[in-house]
Image (cartoon, grey):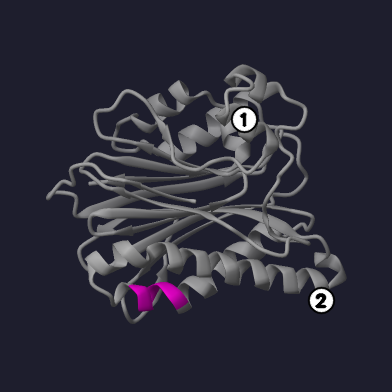
């Protein structure tokens, strides 16, 4: 499924500021979440730190959150493999003109997800310790004027438009409970307490033969915020809390750490990861 949302782009939206973090939570013995931040042009890819800011005029940026299962390092493997595939695919895609890229991004992201899926499935079949390994992957690709995204699993991608009161969930949870909620069969409270809320219908790796990621695009504007988070984050926060924490201010304020700390305090049963990107 492809979702394209257009809104007035801001001529002043020329830089990004990002914040990332992860926490093991209060119950799990290991952290199977992982996140990735990369900057690239047509020639090279650079790995970024947890916090930073940079111009959007000369480079594109990719951010991803993975939540692994069936293997203690599934999220880490997925993050590393995604980095390898992004290095191979996205710099070539950046060489195309922006208008053409907006038309071809679904094929580029679908191929990226297919390659990550195949690599994880190969690991699972080749090594006993990786057998059954699967992961979610929610990915955002920032270019001048646009945010392209891909998604498989139940990690989430949110968009908080500048000045808007409400949070928009761009991704759709690949779970039966997510389907029930989207189709009005249950409400938000029932979805949060459903016994099968964490049972995935789709993931990368494992025994899944094919992958059909959700892909989409949003025109970015000055003051927009985007959030990529694992299900451990959203289990501990309601949408209005996410909005309040995303809009926090202060010289030393880190919205990702604020989101993670609040989610772990409220719930903490799962690993918790957040990547926040602001358009400056």
Image coordinates for residue 75, horizontal then vertical, percent: 65, 57
- Count up the numbered dots: 2
Of residue 146 and residue 31, the one placed in the foreground of this image is 146
| Residue under the point 57% across and 46% down | 22
Main secondary structure type of the part rendered in magenta? helix
Image coordinates for residue 215, horizontal then vertical, percent: 46, 54
Neighbour tally class for label 1: few under 14, some 14-19, many 20 plus, Cα within 10 Å:
some
Of residue 73 and residue 213, the one placed in the foreground of this image is 213
Residue 26 to residue 49: above or below: above
Magenta range is 89-93
When asked about the image quadrant of residue 70, the answer is bottom right
Image coordinates for residue 273, horizontal then vertical, percent: 56, 44
Q: Is residue 52 visible?
A: no
N-terminal of the pair, mark 1 or mark 2, is 2
List the single residue furthest toward the right.
128
Label number found at residue 96: none
* Pointer 1 residue: 235
Q: Is residue 44 visible?
A: yes
List the single residue furthest toward the bottom.
43
Q: Is residue 231 magenta?
A: no
How many angstroms separate mark 1 from mark 2 (CA)?
34 Å
Of residue 191 and residue 267, the one placed in the foreground of this image is 191
Mark 2 element type: helix
Residue 52 to residue 236: above or below: below
Image coordinates for residue 192, horizontal then vertical, percent: 65, 24
| Residue under the point 36% across and 62% down | 61
* Pointer 2 residue: 126
Side of 28 relative to 21 (left or right): right
Q: Is residue 90 magenta?
A: yes
Neighbour tally class for label 2: few under 14, some 14-19, many 20 plus, Cα within 10 Å:
few
| Residue under the point 62% across and 17% down | 189
Side of 206 relative to 25 (left or right): right
């Amino acid at each position: 499924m492809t979702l394209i949302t257009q809104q007035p782009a801001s001529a002043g939206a020329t830089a990004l500021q990002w914040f990332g973090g992860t926490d093991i939570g209060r119950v799990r013995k290991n952290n199977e979440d992982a996140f990735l931040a990369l900057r690239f042009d047509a020639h090279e890819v650079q790995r970024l730190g947890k916090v930073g800011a940079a111009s959007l005029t000369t480079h594109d940026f990719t951010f991803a959150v993975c939540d692994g299962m069936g293997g203690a390092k599934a999220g880490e493997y997925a993050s590393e493999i995604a980095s390898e595939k992004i290095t191979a695919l996205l710099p070539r895609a950046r060489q195309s003109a922006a208008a053409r890229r907006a038309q071809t991004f679904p094929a580029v992201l679908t191929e990226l997800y297919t390659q990550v899926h195949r690599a994880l499935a190969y690991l699972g079949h080749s090594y006993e310790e990786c057998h059954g390994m699967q992961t979610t992957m929610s990915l955002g690709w920032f270019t001048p004027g646009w945010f392209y995204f891909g998604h498989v699993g139940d990690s989430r991608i949110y968009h908080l438009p500048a000045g808007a009161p409400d949070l928009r969930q761009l991704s759709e949870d690949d779970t039966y409970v997510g389907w029930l909620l989207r189709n009005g069969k249950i409400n938000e409270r029932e979805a949060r307490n459903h016994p099968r809320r964490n049972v995935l219908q789709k993931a990368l790796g494992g025994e899944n033969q094919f992958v059909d990621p959700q892909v989409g695009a949003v025109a970015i504007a000055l003051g927009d915020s985007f959030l990529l988070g694992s299900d451990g984050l959203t289990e501990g926060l309601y949408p209005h809390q996410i909005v309040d924490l995303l809009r926090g201010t202060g010289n030393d304020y880190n919205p990702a750490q604020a989101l993670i700390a609040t989610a772990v305090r409220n719930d903490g049963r799962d690993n918790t990861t957040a990547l926040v990107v602001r358009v400056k």
